[in-house]
Image: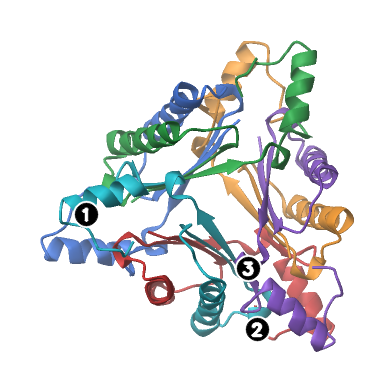
Chain colours: A purple, B green, C blue, D orange, E cyan, F red
Amino acid sequence: MPYVNIKVTREGVTETQKAALIKGVTDLLVEVLHKSPATTMVVIDEVDLDNWGIGGLPVTDYRRLAATSGQGSGSME
Amino acid sequence: MPYVNIKVTREGVTETQKAALIKGVTDLLVEVLHKSPATTMVVIDEVDLDNWGIGGLPVTDYRRLAATSGQGSGSME
Amino acid sequence: MPYVNIKVTREGVTETQKAALIKGVTDLLVEVLHKSPATTMVVIDEVDLDNWGIGGLPVTDYRRLAATSGQGSGSME
Amino acid sequence: MPYVNIKVTREGVTETQKAALIKGVTDLLVEVLHKSPATTMVVIDEVDLDNWGIGGLPVTDYRRLAATSGQGSGSME
Amino acid sequence: MPYVNIKVTREGVTETQKAALIKGVTDLLVEVLHKSPATTMVVIDEVDLDNWGIGGLPVTDYRRLAATSGQGSGSME
Amino acid sequence: MPYVNIKVTREGVTETQKAALIKGVTDLLVEVLHKSPATTMVVIDEVDLDNWGIGGLPVTDYRRLAATSGQGSGSME
């Protein structure tokens, strides 16, 4: 009866993508730990960019800096 | 000084119901563990239906399936 | 299908008390929000005293100070 | 830069299984949301059976009841 | 690679204040535990006043009562 | 009345360091948001290395790889 919480930045995650995350995580727990899907819960939190920090900066500033310094990972983050 | 986090689906929980949850959980901690209400915190998170999964499906799909298969628990979930 | 997380200090909470918390919270969600117990999860976290802070101090120091200053709430916290 | 928290009952999850969960969840976020693995964090919490409740009961009691009533899902939960 | 979650009431926290929290917490972890900022994540949750309880009451009621009883801590809470 | 949760790897964090984290975070919330220390809670979770993943790997493997590839951040993580 696992509980999984996924936090991602709020950037237009679609219904289909959310359903894929829910299915993917549940399948993983069945496969790796033989958990029952019936009692496996997944909660997705979408977090505003201003409210998420990494490297001591809000995400937006962090990405801008990474892009400028040429070390950015492109759009993937 | 307990901290309690209650996550429910966002489906029109009223102010009165939230107050009842806060009071009920606080009373329970006083009764069972003799905690002080003054330092007992309760945070309620309301989660969009698309963002909550069970049985490998978003809640809306899960309920539809349960209703169809006749195994649903009615409106209670 | 609520999920409830209860965090308390690790101070000898008994099995019976844990069962009472689980039952009490589940009953509350049934009563207030008509949730189904079958998909209501409760997770209790017991946190070491060193790892819990309030008033800018670890709990142990906070209680000692409160006792000394005569503003303490006795053993209840 | 997602953050994923997986809570499961503490029942001998092996290092290999933990690594499989970490890899599986990270791959899923890359695949579905094109997130960067470099900033994807996964934290696994193993929760004692006494501290996890479902159906208003601690997991151990819940399983015993499910087994008795013939509605149990076997060892899967 | 710490993960920090800060929950505060939703009361007009500005972008500048959020950036100050992110920077402050990250600096603290570097200073105290020598953690790398590059893998330090901070997530700020702003919680509606109705959804936050203390002393068995929603925050709004709690503050009104504290103000009336003359024990309130002014606007600080 | 903020609630702050700090998750770090379990690697011998001392009592003094924990007290410094609790004081530092509380001071930050007073300074930036004028919160009252009396109702500011901090909970520190120490997570086993096996249970923390980054880059799709458990922390121990991630560090070994980073050290080998010469991109590691030394002992800081």
- The image position of residue C32, as x and y in percent, is 45, 25
Location of mark 2 (residue) = F75
x 48%, y 50%: residue: E48
Q: Could you tell me how far apart the alpha carbons at marks 2 and 3 are, in whole angstroms?
A: 30 Å
Location of mark 3 (residue) = A50
Q: Is residue E34 above or below residue B5?
A: below
Pointer 1 chain: E
x 31%, y 39%: residue: B33
Determine which of the numbered discs, if any, sits on residue E67 in the image. Answer: 1
Q: Could you tell me how far apart the alpha carbons at marks 1 and 3 are, in whole angstroms?
A: 33 Å
- Quarter of the image that includes the N terminus of chain D: bottom right
Dividing the picture into quadrants, the one containing residue A73 is bottom right
Tell me the crowding category of disc 1: few under 14, some 14 to 19, or many 20 or more residues within 10 angstroms, Cα based. Answer: some
Left or right of B22, for residue D19: right
Q: Which one is in front, F29 or C13? A: F29
Amino acid type, callout 3? Asp
Examine the rendering and report whether any part of residue C75 can be seen. Answer: yes
Tell me the crowding category of disc 2: few under 14, some 14 to 19, or many 20 or more residues within 10 angstroms, Cα based. Answer: few
x 39%, y 36%: residue: B19
- Quarter of the image that includes the C terminus of chain D: top right
